[in-house]
Image: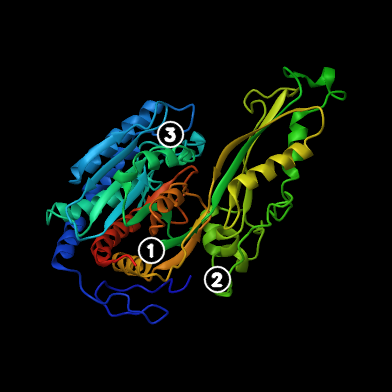
Amino acid sequence: MNNINHTHSSTCGCKNEKGDPLFTTAPSAATQKALNYCESNLKNEYENLKKLVKIPSVSLNGFDENEVKLSAEATAETLRNAGLENVEVLELAKGVHHYVYAEWLHKPDAPTLLLYAHHDVQPPGREDKWNSNPFIPTEKDGRLYGRGTADDKAGIIAHTAAISAYLKTMGELPVNVKVIIEGEEEIGSNNLAQFVRSHKNKLKADGIIVTDCANVDSGIPSITTALRGLVAVDIEVEALDHPVHSGLWGGILPDPVIALSHILASLSDEKGNIKVKGILDDIRPLTNEERTHFSKLKMENIARGATGLLNGLPFIAPESEFAERLWRYPSLSINAIQSGSKKLVSNIIQDAAWARVSIRIVPDMKPQDILNKLTKHIEMICPPGFRLKVTSESASNWWSIADPKADVYQIAARSLEKGYAHTTQFIGCGASIPFVQPLSDEFGGIPAILVGVEDPYTNAHSENESLLLSDFKKSILGQIHMLADLAKYKKS
């Protein structure tokens, strides 16, 4: 990456690759006190994070929903302890996981920022692949391991630690803040639009800071300028009303697993190119500036180290296309397949087979249109006579910044540079955060600043998820600066 080895103190006059000064002024006395408090209080913030991680707040159906409620209550306590006011655990409807809200609104002439994170987590995955208990946070080699350590309970603490640093030293914040911590982000935020409409006045703000993204590499602050959306379906193919002996019936019966395999194989080619008719028609082309910038990014070593790709197995795209493929091009994944049991396998023909298929979509693809085209393709490819069921699981939209050069994003970039002592990178993200688009739109397109504490080695959504503690500290310092610097931001 550009400037990957460029580091310096927070008071130097260094410039980034464009010649712009990284740090032009020393922090105010109030900000310096907050920074000093953060440095001295870091161990307590680590403990606050560990308390949240110990709660297995998996929001997926089939897991204990009471744990998600306990997580919401623990999050509310964390917000109160930070000094925030009017803390509430909000239940939208029966069966919807709880949101948590808090605020500090005592600066009538300053902007109001909505700070977002989520307290629900992914399932732990394969327990035998974890090197430690996923819900007992474990420190090793400068990283904190556990489900939710980075995604996204660290995002909660990044907010509260920055807020606490001001309120515990100065008794006030540079800006007004509203904090919303979601409880169903990992299952698609399906009730988010209704939640925003129900609490529009409560959530109204001048800008959003979302702490649920990743940095392009360890120690390099990054602002995400684009997110892919997500369209996902469950496919179930049924042939029999029960499994049967393959020795007695094999050779005359249709096999639902083979039928499902044909469907899945038809979705993409060996290079990962999606083969569903019409699905690539509405992709927004890159600008010449984007294409030039993307092609220069050196990402192969990061990608190989972060993913553990087998030696000798090539990537399915050249390095010059990595950024475009990850951030601005759709991708299709088979997230899970099930038929029978690996532990109880026997010589049978299965009665049915199931798979989850997802497509990450980009500007200007339309979620419902992609869902319809994917469903139609599956129905067309499925061999006749099988009982086919295609169920929509997600259809969330993409999001992108209109102009990363706008003042608010440049202010945020300079703030992060003060915390990380490194040039900020503007990057895309191949993941989805359904929260961003509807909330920004609901309030007239207010700016959303997407930052994070993850790095390429975090393993979010996989086993051995971890947080680089040095970057966690830097992210908090960056947010302390950001709260002060955005106090000067004036909406156009």
Q: For the point 76% across and 45% down, which residue is it?
A: 266
Going by the image, does 323 lie left or right of 247?
left
Residue 41's x, y, as percent? 19, 52
37 lies left or right of 192: left
Q: Distance between the residues labelled 3 and 2?
A: 37 Å
Q: Mark 3 points at which residue?
A: 58
Which element type, helix, strand or loop, lies under badge 2? helix
Assign a secondary structure to mark 1.
Answer: loop
Q: Compare residues 236 and 121 and report the one nearer the observer.
A: 236
Question: Badge 1: how crowded within 10 Å, few (<14), some, or many (20+)?
Answer: many
Identify which amino acid the numbered label 2 is placed on.
Glu
Q: First in sequence, mark 2 or 1: give its number.
A: 1
Q: Where is residue 286 in the image (x, y as percent from the top left)?
A: 59, 68
Q: In the displayed image of the protein, which residue is found farthest to the right?
A: 252
Residue at left offset 29%, top offset 62%: 478
- Alpha-carbon span between mark 2 and mark 1: 24 Å
Amino acid type at circle 3 is Val
